[in-house]
Amino acid sequence: MAVARLITQNFRNLQGNTIDFNSKLNFFIGDNGSGKSSLLEALFFLGHGKSFRTTKVESLVCYHQCKFVLSVKDDKNCQLGLSKELDTGNTLIKIDGQRRHRLSDLAKNIAIQIITPESFKLFFGGPKERRRFVDLGMFHVKHQFSDQWREFSRVLKQRNACIRNKVDDATLTYWTDLLCQHSQNVSILRREYTENLFTELKQWLNILLPSVNENISVQFTQGWPLKKELCQVYLDNKEKELQFGYSLYGAHKFDVKFMLSKQPLESHLSRGQQKLFLLALTFAQSSLMARVKRIKPILLIDDIGAELDENSRATLSTAIERLNCQVIVTAIEKSVIYPLIQQRSVEEYNMFHVKHGEVLPAKWNPADSDNVSEKVQ
């Protein structure tokens, strides 16, 4: 899918905006604090039911307001809407006018991927960040994953309760056997997906970061020793788990790392190269999601100028041209996006200026090109 129109009411500093998007490429230009990232946050909230910037919902509502509303119409005229009331905590979700009760119902209709300055957590953060990234792709690509993960989580919760309460061996064994079964099912899906993701990643690295492509490898950790049966691992570590009070092994401990010459990738790449790698990885996942044909993902890139020089942005433009999904980009200055639009016709992108939460259409003019030349010199 592609977003055709976004309507915001009382979301952050976006008190009221109606924005018509290009189905291919969109640019939002404005100073820090103008509301650019809030636009991406609004789209992200519709796709994930949460913010990528804060866990405090009250921070998302305009000052002196008690409710925000977000609405999207896609290129197939499907209408998705969400409102959140602070006083009651109620969330109202509608799809084509019909009320729904699960945020996951929205996610089935809109797939949002985002790259922000915080995305470097994929390298420097813990396994939880990498699990979240992989599982987002699996939700859209491996349709059975959602149900299997929900059942795994239910069984894990039960087994952890058994460990904490030190129940009898027969009860613990029952839940242990179930957890082994569900861990194995989830692990098989994740391994298949990770292998496909790595294959696709190599194609995008060949465009965005060809100098390191041949030396990139993937390290997959399923959540327990590869050469051991999980049930035996639980048996061997029974006393240790009783001491900690929860399950130390299983699919919830999954991790995947990308290596450069068998060393941690982040220790050998510059920040600019790391961002290009993140872009390649996100493009790879977007491609896998688009291939399923249920919905095409929407890619959000916040602050495109950060860490990327002009040559890198020109390379990124080539990659975006080959990507079969809608892309929405923010930047502080017009000059930053010039490498991404200089070879494009005006029909291929929309440009907007954001100031104090107000979003207005903008255009590239010859004077902007002159300013770019001056900065390059």
Image (cartoon, helix red, strand yellow):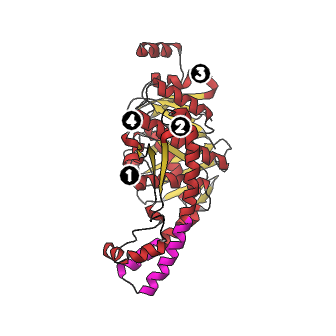
CA gap, disc 4 to disc 3?
Answer: 27 Å
With 103 as the anchor, is 37 left or right in this view? left
Which SS class for mark 4?
helix
* Disc number lying in front (4 or 3): 4
CA gap, disc 2 to disc 3?
Answer: 22 Å
The residue tagged 1 is 58
* Disc number lying in front (4 or 1): 4
Point out the tag, 2 or 3, that comes first from the N-terminus: 2
Residue beneath the point at 61% across and 37% down: 323
- Given the current orientation, which residue lies at the most extreme left position? 243
Crowding at dot 1, Cα within 10 Å, few <14 / some 14-19 / many 20+, comes out as: some
Which SS class for mark 2?
helix
Which SS class for mark 1?
helix
Q: Which span is picked out in magenta?
A: 156-185
Give yes or no for residue 175 being in the magenta stretch. yes
The residue tagged 4 is 271
Crowding at dot 3, Cα within 10 Å, few <14 / some 14-19 / many 20+, comes out as: few
Residue beneath the point at 43% across and 59% down: 89
CA gap, disc 3 to disc 1?
Answer: 43 Å
Residue beneath the point at 47% across and 71% down: 230
